[in-house]
Amino acid sequence: MKKLFSSVMLVSALVFGACGAGSGILTVTDIPAKYNGMYAMMETETPDGDTILGAYDKGFGGVKISGGKANIPTWYLENESYYEDIKPYTGNETVEGMLIIISNDDGQEFAVIFFEHTSISFKKGSAKVSCKDADGIEE
């Protein structure tokens, strides 16, 4: 998990263009009410070792949580690419291990809680997960 967290910290420190245009969406539901108004991001890897990020703007910034839900655009970063090569994620694959990060600011500077999920299937870059079904929670 520390590897994923450090990668998200690096990615969120970078600023890029166009918000979510053409990306899939990760829908996160059943986020506990005490996190409403905070921000959610995601990171996982494809079976080939490429990175899928869930963030507001090409790997930067969390999506505001409202009503226990966040719809997070998904982004794809091919293994060994530079972050300026990030593009909308539209793939169809199952990933083993996903980390959803909740923070109290949209730049992911202060993580509040992590929800870990395993075996999540994406279709056309989109997936849906529930925090109630998390395989692990770390505060």
Image (spheres, rainbow, N blue to C red):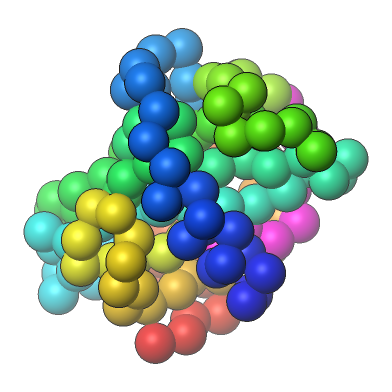
Magenta span includes 93: yes
Q: Is residue 71 above or below residue 4?
A: above
Marker count (numbered): 0
Q: Which residues are magenta?
A: 92-99
Q: Tell me the quadrant of the picture where the C terminus can be found.
A: bottom left
Residue extending furthest toward the bottom: 139
Please report the residue visible at 36 percent of the width from the left and 21 percent of the height from the top. Answer: 17
User: Magenta region, mostly helix, strand or loop?
Assistant: strand
- 87 or 134, nearer to the observer: 87
Residue 13, x across and y down, in percent:
41, 51
Q: Is residue 87 above or below residue 122?
A: above
Please report the residue visible at 20 percent of the width from the left and 67 percent of the height from the top. Answer: 104
- 60 or 65, nearer to the observer: 60
Give the quadrant of residue 57.
top left
Residue extending furthest toward the right: 48
Residue 84, x across and y down, in percent:
56, 27
Q: Is residue 74 above or below residue 34?
A: above
Residue 23, x across and y down, in percent:
48, 20
Please report the residue visible at 32 percent of the width from the left and 45 percent of the height from the top. Answer: 61
- In the figure, is residue 119 to the left or right of 18? right
